[in-house]
Amino acid sequence: MYEQNTPPDESAVQRQDAIDINDFVFAATGARVRRLTLPDGTHWFPAVDVATDLGYANTRDALRHAVSQKHTTSLGDLARTVDPVDGSCKIAGHRLKKHMKMVNLLGLVQLVNGCTKPEAEPFKNWVSEVIVTVQRDGSYSLEPAPVQPAPGGGTAYVMPQQVADAIVRLEERNVRADEMLLAFQEERGELLREISRSQGVIAAALQQIATALDRPAVGQRPAARAESTPQELLAAWKAKNLVVTEDIHAVAAYLAPALLRGGAQYRLEEIAARTGLAQARVHDCVRMLLKRGCMRQQGCTPEGAPVYVLP
């Protein structure tokens, strides 16, 4: 579980991040980091998660040398901020411990700037470009997305190209790792099949011996074959790290039932309307599902809607 959220506070002012926080942190650290979001919209991350993913040998030293004290706190203090009575219990339910050190988004960026992993360079370069732009022009702003969400959903922005490129490179790295893991699993599967065939030969020999001795042999019940469901399909994609962001998961969850029925025939605008995502974001998510082999396109309907099927 990569995201930990506290119950929403209806009295708090709702705030929408200009860049999806999961995408932002993934581009910065190269990993999915657990997150605690307070009712006021501020994000906090376990320092040990961030430091480990960035290659720091010692979390305490990393915080002391790289992070300003005002950008770190203990989880116990945050728990009391969320709920003075039983906040600690709620946090414990998220598999976080009260003594853990937490960093806010500024602290996370400071840890990134202090690390030496090559994967962090694109993000650090973007941060430097933002600073230079502010110094030169007095401000830095994102381009509004060409397709905006429904009224009342806030303004959507185009992700900076440097951040998008970093995400693509990291996802491609994960794909290569998945391919290596898949090859290993195939080799392991072949070995298990060979063992199974050997066990079948032994079982047949034992059956013959039992028949010759006029003794009943212990039979094996065939394993029940479960029907494939959309939830199982999504779980399989997630286990292989093919669904890496909430947006991709939302699009995949919408397409999965139709894919299992034989084919999904939806226009991008229809998916956008049902998922609440911007059409441009839906296009990116569908492209990633196709690229990762979760599905493939099999022509179009007479009306022009693309037809997606399982590979």
Image (cartoon, rainbow, N blue to C red):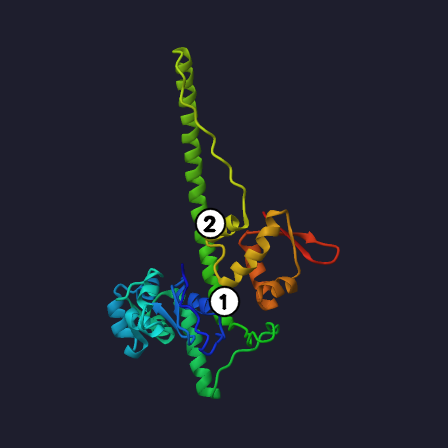
**Percent coordinates x, y for residue 77 in the rendering:** 29, 73
Determine which residue is flagged by label 1. Answer: 165
Residue drawn at (56%, 59%) of the image: 251
Can residue 172 be seen from the camera position used here? yes
Horizontal side, residue 53 vs residue 13: left or right? left
Amino acid type for the residue under numbered disc 1: Asp
User: Which quadrant is home to the N terminus?
Assistant: bottom left
Local secondary structure at mark 2? helix
Q: Measured from the top left, where is residue 189 in percent x and y?
A: 44, 38
Marked residue nearer the N-terminal end (2 or 1): 1
The residue carrying pointer 2 sits among few (fewer than 14), some (14 to 19) or many (20 or more) residues within 10 Å by Cα, namely: few
In the rendering, at what x and y percent does residue 161 appear?
51, 71
- Can residue 54 be seen here? The reply is no
* Relative image position of residue 190 (x, y in whole percent): 44, 36
Q: In the drawing, what numbered circle is on residue 76?
A: none
Q: Residue at x 55, y 52 (%)?
A: 294
In the image: residue 120, left or right of residue 258: left
| Crowdedness near tag 1: few (<14), some (14–19) or many (≥20) residues, C-alpha within 10 Å | some
Q: CA distance from mark 2 to mark 1?
A: 21 Å
Against 169, is 11 above or below?
below
- Residue 185 falls left or right of residue 156: left
Q: Residue at x 42, y 30 (%)?
A: 196
Answer whether labels 2 and 1 touch (C-beta < 8 Å).
Answer: no
Front-most of 159 and 33?
33
Q: Give the secondary structure at mark 1.
A: helix
Q: Amino acid at mark 2?
A: Glu
Q: How many marks?
A: 2
Q: Note whether 128 is above or below 232 in the view shown.
A: below
> Which residue is under mark 2?
179
